[in-house]
Image: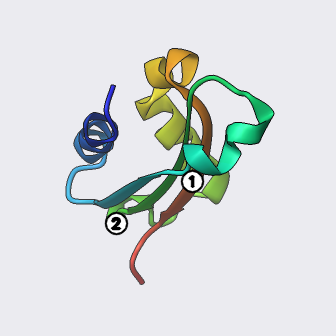
Amino acid sequence: MSIDLIKTKLENAFPGAQVEVKNTTSMHQSHGSAGLHLKTKIIFDGFKGIPLIERHRKVYDALEEEMKFIIHALSIEAKYES
């Protein structure tokens, strides 16, 4: 699965959000893990009033299948515009 498909999946899960996905796998090659290392930034008005841990759970839920087989590590910045 490409980074663009992962980004599209997040955009579909969080309609109207600003979504950035960066592949940081090359920075982690020394420890020999299989799978992608990704850094995400999602700005979504729907996150307002939701605790940070719950925002992260929602992102993990959106990428549930990818977390099993494709993504090894996921850095999440999930916020709303104030």
Q: Nearer the viewer, residue 4 or 9?
A: 4
Q: Residue at x 57, y 53 (%)?
A: 76
Q: Is residue 66 above or below residue 27?
A: above
- In the image, taking residue 6 as reference, residue 40 lies left or right, namely right
Residue that mark 1 sits on: 76
Residues under labels 1 and 2: Cα distance?
16 Å
State yes or no: discs 1 and 2 in contact (Cβ < 8 Å): no
Residue 17: x and y in percent read 28, 60
Residue 16: x and y in percent read 20, 59
Quarter-of-image position of residue 7: top left
As shown in the figure, which amino acid type bears the numbered disc 2?
A: Asp
Q: Is residue 45 above or below residue 2?
A: below
Q: Quadrant of the C terminus?
A: bottom left
Q: Which mark is residue 45?
A: 2
Q: Residue at x 31, y 33 (%)?
A: 2
Q: Quadrant of the N terminus?
A: top left
